[in-house]
Amino acid sequence: MRTLISNGTIVTADGSTAADVLIDAETIVQVGRDLAAAGATADETIDATGRYVIPGGIDAHTHMELPFGGTFAKDTFETGTRAAAFGGTTSIIDFAVQSRGGSLREGLDTWHAKAEGNAVADYGFHMIMSDVNDGTLAEMDGLVAEGIPDFKLFTAYPGVFYSDDGAIFRAMQQTARNGGLIMMHAENGMAIDVVAAQTVAAGMTDPIGHGVARKAVFEGEATNRVIRLAEAAGVPVYIVHLSASDALAEVRAARDRGTKAFAETCPQYLFLSLDDMGNGFEGAKFVCSPPLRSQDTWDDLWTGLVKDDLQLVATDHCPFDFHGQKELGRGDFRKVPNGLPGVEDRVDLLHDGGVVGGRISRERWVEIVSTAPAKMFGMYPQKGAVAVGSDADLVIYDPNRRHTISATTHHMNVDYSCYEGRSVQGGSDIVLSRGMVIVRDGQFTGRKGHGRFIKRAPANHARMS
């Protein structure tokens, strides 16, 4: 099957140009002007006049079917990757979870079983380490060789995922030897638990208490601490879901002194705020960790994206229904399942708020939603590029089409939207995954099981700092 995409404007992280793209089976084989006139033949021609041709989005932080607080995130690998595709994302990297006391292998095998034969678009895995010991440290080397070179640890959630400084440092020393990357959820979980208990005792049990207890200074402190540990170990470190100006200041200072410190933020920290958590129990819809911050944080985070102190935007997609799941926390915000839906909305929100809003160029938009995650996590130029030899993961994107985000029309398997009623400019008209059209004009045309596991190489983060 050969497909020709003609008359579009190719937008990549490096620039924009009017050109055609020729696909043979799953791969881009030619990029250039007037390819049909030059003799290119195709079984199907897609006219992209007036639209962008961009590399498929890559969401480097998702949690499909994640167990949390006695329940599970609602999206499966089938529903989650399908929703992602509607939003212009053609690859995700999900987090496999090591159960405390279990092996990394057991956790990884469980996640492979969830995804294989179910995903409609390509997927990779990071590995959550909840128990750092001699056995799991040795296992890290094997996972790197298998294409899972990233390991997430937590300074938050004592008793569940929390690792102390010694465990974090030992894991970092291991990545110094095997080329992997430590990803950190950086909040001071011990201090947060003290404040949360005091907040409930004082009578503040509604979801707003979640935001009050998880103070920005706790994120800043933990971010500084894990960066310093990485400096001591001589390794790069990646901060997930950075939400606070305090934390961004620590990343910026580290990068200014030459440290290989990297970070992502998420759409919720650019478009939502602590105010959204203040409407009684309705605020449970917006409970995530780190929590939403005050609106004055938005400008800082956008500046971080402009200046590359924040390298990319991922979603931390972890959807729980408001009814029956978020409601587990009625009367005690500490029991609200932490997580928000967003895998379908990321690309459009960033186009509308970033490009249309005048904060970033369309090239930087493509970089933060696709190319930077591909480079950061060992997939470039297989993914994240419109280039000969790259996977034909492509989006025909209409930069002018307006639509309204709503739970009544989204494809995520969750009963509410964080962005309900928000009008955005820009939308994915046609989405291709490895040459197959999986979304066309609002209709799903892909198939369950089309998605493949992405074996990723350790990235050369020295080039990215």
Image: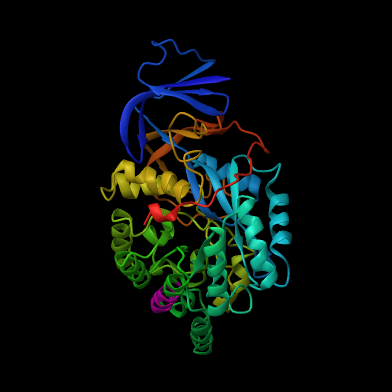
Rendered image coloring scheme: rainbow
Helix, strand or loop: magenta stretch: helix
- State yes or no: residue 217 in magenta: yes
In this picture, which residue range is highlighted in magenta? 216-226
| Apparent side of residue 19 relative to residue 330 in the rendered image (left or right) | left
Answer whether residue 357 is visible to the viewer in this image.
yes
Residue at 51% in and 35% down: 393
Of 159 and 180, the residue lying toward us: 180
x, y percentage for residue 192? 49, 81
| Apparent side of residue 355 relative to residue 368 in the rendered image (left or right) | left
Residue at 48% in and 85% down: 195
- Residue extending farthest to the left is 358
x, y percentage for residue 296? 29, 67
The answer to which image quadrant residue 144 occupies is bottom right
The answer to which image quadrant residue 366 occupies is top left
Residue at 60% in and 53% down: 148
Residue at 65% in and 36% down: 450
- Residue extending farthest to the front is 177
Of 452 and 350, the residue lying toward us: 452
x, y percentage for residue 139? 67, 62
- State yes or no: residue 44 in magenta: no
Is residue 293 depicted above or below 179 in this figure? below
Quarter of the image for the C terminus: give it: bottom left
Of 310 and 275, the residue lying toward us: 310
Q: How many marks?
A: 0
The answer to which image quadrant residue 129 occupies is bottom right
x, y percentage for residue 199? 49, 85
Quarter of the image for the N terminus: give it: top right
Answer whether residue 424 is visible to the viewer in this image.
no
Is residue 347 depicted above or below 240 in this figure? above
